[in-house]
Amino acid sequence: MALLTPFTFSQSSLQDYGDCSRRFQLRYIDQLSWPAIESEPLLEGEKHQQEGQLFHRLIQQYFLGLPIDKLAKHANTPDLARWWKNFIVWSKDLSAHPDSERFHPESTLSMPIGSHRLLAKYDLLIVADNHARIYDWKTNAKRPREDWLAARWQTRVYRSLLTRAGSHLNAGQPLIPEQIEMVYWFAEYPSEPAIFKYDSKQFKRDWSAIQKAVKEIGSAREFPMVDDEKTCRFCTYRSYCNRGSKAGTLDEGFGDLAAEDGFDVNHEQIGEIDF
Ligand code: SF4
């Protein structure tokens, strides 16, 4: 079976294809979901995922202007309380910004790419004075390396799509790559954000890579399994591929990064949390 047109690509689906094209097929073409647990222990993984979603929701509500004391009541687990405290201290400079209209929490951008679409959901965009900063909140137990983050589709898609489709956030003026930067802020490491500036050369490289990947996936008829079986240990589709029944553990070095991917925040789910 081939990909239906038009398909809406995101950093997650591009990353799935990059990690294992078979995973892309199972998830987006066959639309199979969650046949195996992704990491051990299961309860700990689920708890981390739920707390991550609630944390994103708390920050979104914070930027929409809800009172801090009302929000703080929902940070009611040890992890959430620690993340929230770190966020409130760190965000003081941000919230002192004079023009709140420049803050765009939980924003979505999309545009056509070939016969498909490309979409990105941003945790927070701040656009002011011909300068744009993308913020992404991460709850990794271990801080990922800079080179690992730089190579992720998220870093490439978020910056390039803002360059291509963000002019309405900048009073109708196109943003050039040199005006854009992306910040991964880590709730466990509040004073160690990963900051990625951007330039025209990187943008040209990223956009060309995105177009190439979209074209390749759109015309693919075969989706082979990844050679490196280490990738499979944190994949929900192990049973479909005969790649083992035992999940990797959250405290393994690789597992921590894989778990963060698997727990990529679903903004639709966030919206259902009751405040
Ligand atoms: S189990 Fe391995 S081969 Fe199968 S979809 Fe997952 S990563 Fe790919």
Image (tube, rainbow, N blue to C red):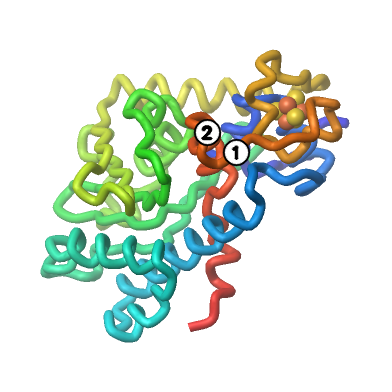
Tell me which residue sits at (57%, 32%) in the image. Answer: 15
Q: Is residue 118 above or below residue 91?
A: above
**What percent of the width, then of the height, locates residue 89?**
18, 64
Q: Is mark 1 within 8 Å of ligand 1?
A: no
Residue 54 in picture, x, y percent from top left? 48, 67
Considering depth in this image, is 253 or 179 the residue closer to the camera? 253
Tell me if I can see residue 3 in this picture. Answer: no
Q: Are marks 1 and 2 in contact (CB under 8 Å)?
A: yes
Quadrant showing the N terminus: top right
| Amino acid type of the residue that numbered disc 2 sits on in the rendered structure | Glu
Q: Quadrant of residue 178?
A: top left
Q: Give the class, few, some or many, for how many residues have Cα within 10 Å of label 2's Cα (few <14, many ≥20).
A: few
Amino acid at dot 1 = Thr
Q: Observer-nearest residue: 81 or 98?
A: 81
Find disc 2 in the rendering and name its residue. 252
Q: Looking at the picture, does residue 144 appear above or below residue 125?
A: above
Q: Residue at x 18, y 48 (%)?
A: 130
Residue corresponding to mark 1: 249
Instruction: Please tell me which residue lies in front, 55 or 208.
Output: 55
**Residue name at image x 78 percent, y 33 percent:** 238
Mark pair 1, 2: CA separation:
6 Å
Of all residues, the one furthest to the top in this rendering is: 227
- Counting the numbered discs, the total is 2
199 and 76: which one is in front?
76
